[in-house]
Amino acid sequence: MFTLAQRDRKIRNLPFFPMLSEAKPRKGTLPHEEYAEPLTALPDYLRPVVTVGFRTGMRLDEIVSLTWRNVDWIEKIIRIDDSKNSEAREIPFSEELETALHEQHAKRQDGCDRVCFRVNRLGTRSPSEISVRRGVALVRK
């Protein structure tokens, strides 16, 4: 606004606003060996969450809100309607992820349209409720 005001000669000098420094981009990826080992120690209902996240780079909120209507089996694409930047995007998935999604799809139950769900002690499937605090995934039961 100050730039527009200066252009229209409504103000003479622009005030100085110091800019904050930007964080450096994250570097590196997790090698497959380091990903596969802890995956086996996780409970069954968390494995799809970690697999989808590792293979696609999707955010945790996107993963736990993912429904089967977002998965296009023919095109091998996961469609995210509303992402963090409010833009739709398409994420192709690999054969490993396709296998994991098929296994998860076989375990589904009527009334639960989520890709990532957990089975309670009564055998009913419900959406996984996961939150992140200080970089650690916490599961609400």
Image (spheres, rainbow, N blue to C red):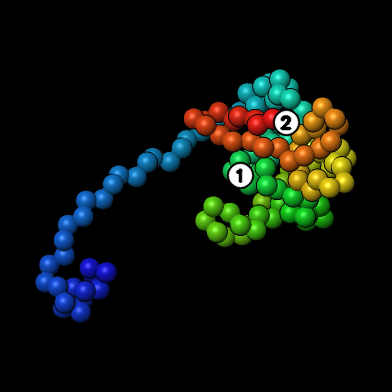
Q: Quadrant of residue 99?
A: top right
- The residue identified by callout 1 is 61
Residue 135 in the image, given as x and y percentages of width and height: 52, 30
Q: Earlier in the sequence, mark 2 or mark 1?
A: 2
**Could you tell me which quadrant the C terminus lies in?**
top right
Depth order, front residue of 84/101:
84
Which residue is painted at 46% across and 37% down in the image? Answer: 26
Position of the N terminus, as image quadrant, is bottom left
- Numbered disc total: 2
Query: Which residue does the image show at 71% across and 20% down from the upper left?
Result: 41
Q: Which residue type carries mark 2?
A: Arg
> Viewer-proximal residue, 54 or 109?
109
Instruction: In the rendered view, tell whether residue 42 sits above or below residue 83.
Output: above
Helix, strand or loop under label 2: helix
Q: Residues within 10 Å of mark 1 (few under 14, many from 20)?
A: some
Q: Residue furthest left?
A: 12
Direction from residue 10 to residue 19 in the image, left or right: right
Residue 12 position within the rendered picture, expressed as x and y whole percent measured from the top left: 11, 72
Q: Which residue is mark 2?
A: 47
- Point out residue 108 in the picture as x, y percentages from the top left corner: 85, 41
In the rendered image, the vertical position of residue 9 relative to residue 61, given as above or below: below
**43 and 93: which is toward the camera:** 43
Q: What separation in Å lies between label 2 and label 1 (alpha carbons)?
A: 16 Å
Q: Is residue 107 left or right of residue 89?
A: right
Residue sitting at the far front: 122
